[in-house]
Amino acid sequence: MTTADAATGGTDTRRPWWRRVFGKHPIGYLFAGPYVLFWLALFAWPLYLAVYMSFRDWFFAAPGAVVDRPFVGLANYTDVLSDPAVHRAALNVAIFILINVPLTVIVSLVLAAALNQVLPLRGFFRTAYYVPYVTASVAMIAVWLFLFSNGGMVNQVLGPLAPDPSWLVNRYWAMPMIALFATWKQLGFYVLLYLAAMQGISETLYEAAEVDGAGPLRKFWSVTVPGVRSATALVVVLATIVGANFFTEPYLLTGGGGPNGASVSPVLLMYRAGIEQGDAGWAAALGVMLAVVVMALSAVNRFFLEDRE
Amino acid sequence: MSDTTDTPATVDDDAADPAGTAGRTERWTPGRIGSFALLAIGAVVFLFPFWYMVVGSLQTEPNTTVAGAFPSPGNLTFANYADIDSRVDLVQTLINSSIFTGGVIVLTLVLGLLAGYALAVLDFRGRGAVFTIVLLSLVLPFQLLMIPLYVLLVRTYGLADSYLGMILPFAVNATAVFIFRQFFRSLPEEMFEAARIDGASELQILTRIAMPMAKPAILTAVLVTFIGPWNEFLWPFLITKDQSMQPLAVALANYITNIAGRAANPFGAILAGATVLALPAVALFLAFQRHFLSTDVGSGFKG
């Protein structure tokens, strides 16, 4: 602010009082105001409401009806924590993250490193990887349903090796299939993220490694991988957030979290309890816990991946 | 230092033209062959389902053998498109998708340009707090807000089955704010000062000077914003029960879960619907792919 002040003419004897209180451009409030208002109405207020509802016996009533929604303390939280479906959903989130995060990091890192060279068809490859990312989940799930259904092409190819029951209705395979689908769908985004990070690595590092006699693999491991550490932190955080919030996949790909609840997700349970069954307090409590866990995981990931240097 | 290398060089960012190739010797070392093979396998894995969707949508009889992955002249039809249209009303659902997506884009641009300009160019007390607010809306998952937003918009304000109800939650778009903030910060400070000395108001500076220069950033924001609502399932699914108000993604998903069993060739009809849903986003991406930069999201996170 001081340099900008000098530019407008430093001979001003005194700045007007409003400038000292509000800053040089009070019109900034009008510019930022609309976003802040929307944020208050559609983010901060619902966030408060989520916490408020989670401590109440909250159910739906006709609009305008005055109903009593008593404070129930931690009852919703204890209900959620003792529900076997929630345990299964938590296990599924763990399965999802354990498959999705390492697979995403390794495959997108390798593909980005391969792309970060002078090769024919580079532009084509980059485009190809991004296509699933820009396509609607609903459309891509339709294809996976076709591919992995009982008489689908994957089973046709596998013949007797096909799992029985088929992938999406098999209680051991349903959840890994969801994780594989999500990984596949998002991977192009992470490849490009890594590619951008790799282009920021100084070439002198590679040259120095080469002088020291490093081969391509050694250079990848000792220069590229450490060079994209902050991108890795971002990838892990984003993949974890996605992992805790999947809904469309169990709803559509495995027919509502089937078979027999084997692929339910927390958000699917929130939808069922909160909107189908009207027990919004229970759903809000699950949502609050989910958000706390996700943000804690993100913070831990960031701490370990970013601050080690 | 060594002068001839084929290390991973800094490569040109233009997808259509890897201009870095000029003047470089392209020897097919084992490493490069391996990389190329890897990339080619990757491309098949990523593109095959897309290809299979289009081929499957054109089959008279679903053919799930390997041969079915290739269009065969005797088994081609557009009947699946007519079939899905008779059940889902493609025109109406596409209009709904367009209004939903268009509304989100307009709101995002207006709010994002104003807030991005304020954060990048204007100096006012509390700017740091506004920046924190934008950051917060980036880190918290939407799903946590799903239940209270539903209560607020549907139960309290009666916005079920309305475009406004679909659009509003997507208006708080931090990514767009970051894109614009980043761009406006890259413009020289003297330019804004000069315009102020000439007596231009901040709104004039934004609309007449900064925005015309920000066309690439605006295009990026439009494209990045587009794929959100166009592809979104959960929120419009929650608040639209009336099929005449549903975006295509929701109507198609409901078709998949409810009535697919009754169609003559359910997979053909589903894949036809999927193709119609996928094409606009993919076409936009192919046409403007240089502007779909995931780095914008990355830079947003770094602040």
Image (cartoon, coloured by chain):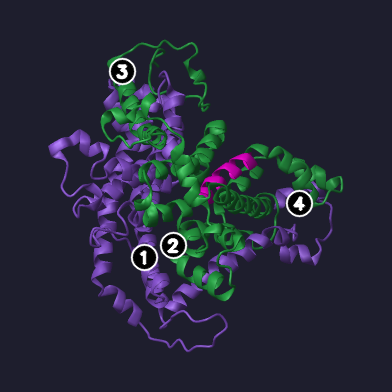
Chain colours: A purple, B green
Q: Quadrant of the N terminus of chain B?
A: top left
- Residue A157: % across, % down: 21, 33
Q: Residue at x 55, y 58 (%)?
A: B244
Whether B100 is drawn above or below B37: the answer is: below
Closest to the observer: B98 or A128? B98
Q: Compare residues A236 and B271 and report the one nearer the observer.
A: B271
Residue B225 highlighted magenta (yes or no): yes
User: Going by the image, does B125 lie left or right of B60?
Assistant: right
Are the numbered discs 4 and 1 placed on the same chain, yes or no?
yes
Nearer-the-camera pick, A280 or A251: A251
Tag on residue A5? 4
Q: Which mark is on residue B143?
A: 2
Mark 3 falls within which chain? B
Range of residues picked out in magenta: B217-231
* Chain that bears disc 4: A
- State the residue position of label 1: A290
Asked whether residue A92 is drawn in magenta, I would say no
The answer to whether dots 3 and 2 both sit on one chain is yes
Which residue sits at x=50%, y=64%?
B241
The image shows residue B208 at horizontal and vertical percentages of 78, 43
Label located before the other in sequence (3 or 2)? 3
Tell me the CA gap for discs 1 and 3. Answer: 45 Å
Q: Which chain's residue wears label 2?
A: B
Residue displayed at 85% across by 46% down: B197
SS type, badge 1: helix
- Spatial distance from mark 1 to mark 2, Cα to Cα? 9 Å
Residue under the image location 62 percent in, 50 percent down: B102
The crowding category of the residue bearing disc 4, from other C-alpha atoms within 10 Å (few below 14, some 14 to 19, many at least 20), is few
